[in-house]
Amino acid sequence: MARRTFHRAPEAERRHDLIEATLDCIAEYGLEGATVRQIAIKAGVTAGLIRHYFQSKEHILQEAYRVVIARLTEKAERVTGDPETRLRDFIVINLTEPVANSRSLSLWASFISRVSVDPELAAIHREGYLSFRNALEGLLGDFLAARGADASPERCRRLAIAINGLLDGLWLEGCLAGELFGESELVEIALTSIETLLGLRLRPVDAAGTDR
């Protein structure tokens, strides 16, 4: 198991390094295998130093899950441009690297198996889901309003729920068996499906100059 090089740094950076080591361990061994000892070995520190920054293994796992959730959403939430570009880019980002890859799936699967039995992880999951859905609702509202369509909060909420479910399913398929699909095939399926839900067309990805 490769060790990280741990160095003297401010507290926030040290915590960050320990969380990264935790994620490496989870990706390699799963939640049960990511013991404090294994995390310490990966980080190149003592178990005592980990306990200095985190009260328990459960505490560091909770912080690690927050990072996983944030990484699945933060890039998509920083989209820029006109309403149509932002909505389309949000969709594309969620179905391509680095959001959609085997490591993201491994980490997500490890945590999701515990969400239903761990109230703290469940709260983190709910917070992340609502943050993602709220961002999507805002993008939909701006896009629909720009097209002169019904952009009521209730319609945007229901559309966001449906589109989130669609993206989740395609993301899972792409992470599990990406080799079964053509280049950008899942993105194209997502865009055409969302067009059907909205009753409006989106500019093609290439025509809009979005990186694939």
Image (spheres, rainbow, N blue to C red):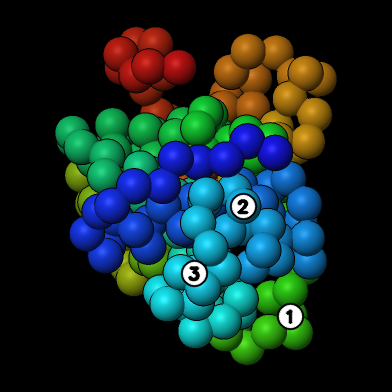
Distance from label 1 to label 2 (Cα)?
30 Å
Where, quadrant-wise, is the N terminus in this rendering?
A: top right
Q: Which residue is mark 2?
A: 41
Name the residue located 26 percent from the left edge and 65 percent from the top edge. Answer: 11
Question: Is residue 109 toward the left or the right of residue 57 in the image?
Answer: right
- SS at circle 3: helix
Residue found at the far bottom of this picture:
119
Q: Which mark is residue 116?
A: 1
* Residue 136 image point, x, y percent: 39, 55
Label at residue 153: none
Q: Considering only vertical position in the picture, is 194 above or below 29? A: above
Q: Amino acid at mark 2?
A: Ile
Judged by depth in the image, the label closer to the viewer, 3 or 1, is 3
Q: Residue 50 got which mark?
A: 3
Does 134 appear above or below 98? below
SS at mark 2 in the image: helix
